[in-house]
Amino acid sequence: MTENSLMLEIRNLHASVAGNEILKGVDLTVRAGEVHALMGPNGSGKSTLAHVLAGRPGYEVTQGTVFYKGKDLLATPPEERARQGVFLAFQYPVEIPGVSNVYFLKNALNAIRKARGEPELDAMDFLKLVKEKAKLVDLDEELTKRPVNEGFSGGEKKRNEIFQMAVLEPSLAILDETDSGLDIDALRIVAAGVNALRSPDRSMLVVTHYQRLLNYIVPDFLHVLVEGRIALSGGKDLALELEERGYTWLEKEPAPVASGANC
Amino acid sequence: MSLDNSSVLELTNREYKAGFVTDIESETVPAGLNEDVVRTISAKKNEPEWMLEWRLRAFRHWITMVEPTWANVHYPAIDYQSIVYYSAPKTKKDGPKSLEDVDPKLLETYEKLGIPLRERAKLAGVAVDAVFDSVSVATTFREQLAKVGVIFCSFSEAVHNHPELVKKYLGSVVPYSDNFFATLNSAVFSDGSFCYIPKGVRCPMELSTYFRINSANTGQFERTLIIADEGAYVSYLEGCTAPIRDENQLHAAVVELIALENAQIKYSTVQNWYPGDKEGRGGIYNFVTKRGKCQGRNSKISWTQVETGSAITWKYPSCILQGDDSVGEFYSVAVTNNRQQADTGTKMIHIGKNTKSTIVSKGISAGHGQNTYRGMVKILGKADNARNYSQCDSLLIGDQCGAHTFPYIEVGNSLAQMEHEASTSKIGEDQIFYFQSRGISAEDAVSMIVNGFCKQVFKELPMEFAVEAQKLLGVSLEGSVG
């Protein structure tokens, strides 16, 4: 994949959850190597967009198209999307009792390698990879042996997501509020991990509430999602403006009282 | 222990693999049950008078009994007069002397099942006493076992060659009058396995029996008797498959274990009888009585079962802890998918002092499956310092299935210590999506979660069996997620 080639093309995307339309015509283009930040008030559809892209059941696309590397993403089942390089770092990672983190990840990696036509990694090589990548996000190696996310603190769960991303090496990483619930030190570590994974053939869509994350992960573009549509796009400086002015001025019918963003 | 995921993948989208019929002429007794049939069975097996007498006592008792209805399973009434009670593959007059004498079609059947006697037995160091419908056709490694004094043969042979042991122990744990199905078995049992480990001998290999029901409408009535003499040790594996049949087939087996002082018996089962189709047509009724007696001081009996097959399972492998310091264990995984029903568990009867029992039961329900754990822990008055630990976990897949738990606890000694833990969980859509978002299919996700759930039990199985059990779970739960 060459730089500037199209990674993700979202056109007029409408999606509903339980009959309620959340996305009302999203347009977004992400090229290879770019980092896009997606901000917006609560309920604007940020997480919905992240889940629609990953293929979560229950999120119904009613209109529009999404192309990933030129292929129709919406027609692809979720595990196929992952095998083709789409990765979602969850805002609330679930616990999987009885299945160890390494075992889970080894199966995931080998499913992806298989889809790419690469040989499966054996246990030795895999453990070497785990050691190396765990360092990247300062994840206690003990945690890799425990059941997936079971008994992990909020911060450990988020670090585990970035650790998984480091192992799986996706082409398109969607980070859904990876910063929420992190203290400043954990935020730095996670951001450093994400930055280390930036590369010319990897794109990222960073969903966040807070401008502060963008001090650490500096995006190439920033979009503001309001009421299911992208209301404004710009460069990284837009984040600072939002921090000052909030989102209300972007809404069609401004609320009587300024909400002061979402802090 | 780790599961090779590719093996599960390979097994998905597969029909019931053991579903084929071997075309061999069977020597069959007409359907129905009366004293004449009992006599005929006994005569066909050339049994001594005492054996026939025992069968007849059982039969006369059986006709006074009524089928139990307390189990949480539902099925149309069984017509016991329409069942064929004996079916044996036709053999040369004196039966096979070696593998070369065995009908090649029989051996082919075993090959298809993945148990080539010759290679596998040798490679795996397992002595297989293969029961085909009702008669043992081949026994391997007998000589090697004989060197250390271990007797491992078919039940019929034991009746002829070791009558003193059979007379002494037959019915000593499960009396002929025990319950409706055990009594029926006592009257008409066709064959089974017999095993005796002499004093102080550690059996040099895992002993194994593969059961298989072949003829249509043939009830299979196996009888297994295992005796571990003082200080002896044996690990016994039982595997079961049956070809596809439209009608339900009755399987009413009896297993008796006796452990004398300082002896240990480990009994492992992987049960894969035909479960019936998606609508619940066909399948095996598996009504089995399994019980072990820790007769001597410091003896131990351990049951491990993985029950994935059968339309209906009614089975409670139990331990009578008679000797002081004896130990009973029960590790169970029971899976019900589609229309399968299982009512299974254990009984731990503490009689001796310082006796200890452990129960770990894992029930998995999918489709319209109904899974019941029924267990009893009974501490008798003289069982000072008895201890029991019970853990019953249920896992639900989908919203049409059911999990039920009936623990009975009776304590007659104030020094007893009892612990009981139970949990019910459900595989959530969010969990499955988490796997999918990492490239793992929904089927594999369920398989991995289920195997994680069962780990505690699988680690009790001999390695080979553990791998087979994991594969079976994958097959059994196939199609359980949409």
Image (spheres, rainbow, N blue to C red):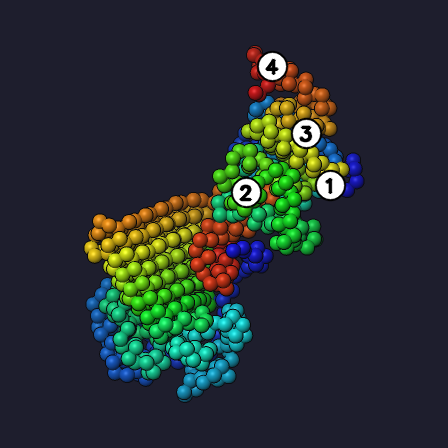
- Tag 4 residue: A254
Q: CA distance from mark 1 to mark 3?
A: 27 Å
- Circle 4 marks a residue in which chain? A
Element type where label 4 sits in the image: loop
Q: Is residue B66 above or below residue B196?
A: above
Q: Nearer the viewer, mark 1 or mark 3?
A: 3
Q: Is residue B288 above or below residue A61?
A: below
Q: Is residue B47 visible?
A: yes
Q: Do callouts 1 and 3 point to residues on the same chain?
A: yes
Circles 1 and 4, Cβ within 8 Å, touching? The answer is no
Q: Amino acid at mark 4?
A: Pro
Q: CA distance from mark 1 to mark 4?
A: 38 Å
Residue at 33% x, 83% y: name it: B160
- Tag 2 residue: A143
Tag 3 or tag 2, which sits nearer the N-term? 2
Q: Do callouts 4 and 2 point to residues on the same chain?
A: yes
Tag 3 or tag 1, which sits nearer the N-term? 1
Q: CA distance from mark 1 to mark 2?
A: 38 Å
Q: Estimate the x, y position of residue B451 in percent, counting from the top left.
A: 49, 53
Q: Amino acid at mark 3?
A: Ile
Element type where label 3 sits in the image: loop
Tag 4 or tag 1, which sits nearer the N-term? 1
Q: Nearer the viewer, mark 4 or mark 3?
A: 3
Q: Estimate the x, y position of residue B120 in percent, counting from the top left.
A: 53, 72
- Circle 3 marks a residue in which chain? A
Residue A217 - label: 3
Element type where label 2 sits in the image: helix
Q: Do callouts 4 and 3 point to residues on the same chain?
A: yes
Task: Estimate how packed mark 3 is, as few (under 14), some (14 to 19) or many (20 or more) residues with alpha carbons within 10 Å.
Answer: many
Q: Amino acid at mark 1?
A: Gly
Q: CA distance from mark 4 to mark 3?
A: 30 Å
